Image (spheres, helix red, strand yellow):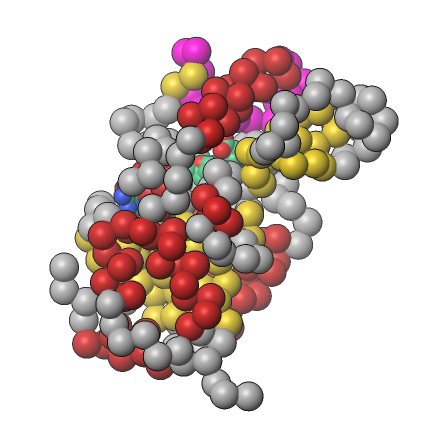
Amino acid sequence: MQISAELLRRFAGAKRVLVLTGAGVSAESGVPTFRGAGNTIWKGMPFDVISSGRMIERDLPAVWEWFDYRRNVLDNILPNPAHYEIARWQERFDELSLVTQNVDGLHQKAGSRNVVELHGNIWRARCIKCGCSRDYSSEQRPDACHACGDLLRPDVVLFGELLPAGAFEFAAERAAGCDLCFVIGTSALVYPAAGIPEIAKAGGAFLCEVNPERTPLSGICDEVLIGKAGEVLPLFGSLNHQSTKSQT
Ligand code: BV8
């Protein structure tokens, strides 16, 4: 895998970096991607049906079954070298914005802080009535809200639902101001997340995609690194690691 001199130069000199990740960054950890083996199907339903807001009203127990299944899959899954390399970048650059579509929490498990979770987190549940959200990663999730007793739902963004307040706006602002943007392991088909690299490009950022396959975004990227994130990202780590953080 050859990383161009241009990208190496940009990486060495970058101050504000934005990283957008999708399911592909967790693939080498053993988390199935959505489009890996054709559209993911659950009990005969395409994932963007079982993972749609309408299902909450129609059949909440079925939604919990789908997310409990995925929580169990994730239970003994660990981050991979891609997650760890990205976590190291927060010490390297003045501003590292990590924006993910993933709900698996593996970036945080690898040590990344202030992760912008555009689509929520599978380990949290939110009350349908009072809206209070709580992390249930280390305990059995109750059936009812501990605050008001009403029903709980997964604290993830389902299709047809709005993103968490301010999350997209924050990501878009950071994208518009970054000088280097990495797009890692996403098919770039789900909006508004897939619009973030376009905002970075329009803001003058150098756009680099990491994916074993080309995507609808590849055409606007300055560099496309065709490969697996867990193999490609550590190549940046092997670059002499002096931080570009300005000595304030
Ligand atoms: C909304 C949480 C306002 C739940 C998810 C504009 C145009 C068209 C449609 C729309 C539009 N605006 C809105 C829509 C509708 C919809 C949408 O985008 N539909 C798509 C299908 C066309 N968007 C929404 O509904 C959003 N809400 O817009 O609200 C609104 C409301 C009503 C009406 C209009 C507007 C909410 C979207 C969020 C849904 N929730 N997840 C759950 O997890 O179940 S989305 C979910 O799917 C993920 O979070 C992610 O975003 C997406 C999957 O994409 P990827 O992560 O990229 O994964 P995928 O499997 O597709 O690809 C993996 C990639 O990795 C591949 O490229 C592969 O080659 C690569 N790869 C594989 N191995 C590796 C690798 N890469 C690197 N290394 C490897 N080893």
Do we see residue 48 in this rendering? no
Give x and y (percent) for residue 11.
Answer: 32, 74
Image point 61% across, 53% down: which residue? 167
Q: Is residue 84 above or below residue 62?
A: below
The residue lying toward the viewer, choosing from 189 and 101, is 101
Placement of the N terminus among the 4 image quadrants: bottom left
Q: Looking at the rendering, which quadrant does residue 224 occupy?
A: bottom left
Judge left or right: residue 140 versus residue 178: right
Do we see residue 147 in this rendering? yes
Give x and y (percent) for residue 85.
Answer: 35, 59
The residue lying toward the viewer, choosing from 53 and 83, is 83
Give x and y (percent) for residue 75.
Answer: 46, 29
Placement of the C terminus among the 4 image quadrants: bottom right
The stretch in magenta equals: 43-59
Judge left or right: residue 3 versus residue 137: left
User: Looking at this rendering, what residue extends furthest in the left direction?
Assistant: 1
Image point 29% across, 40% down: which residue? 28
Q: Looking at the rendering, which quadrant does residue 15 occupy?
A: bottom left
The residue lying toward the viewer, choosing from 43 and 94, is 94
Image point 39% across, 78% down: which residue? 243
On whether residue 23 falls in the magenta region, the answer is no
Give x and y (percent) for residue 209.
Answer: 30, 57
The residue lying toward the viewer, choosing from 108 and 14, is 108
Q: Is residue 151 above or below residue 13?
A: above
Q: How many marks?
A: 0
Image point 38% across, 55% down: which residue? 84
Q: Is residue 183 above or below residue 66?
A: below
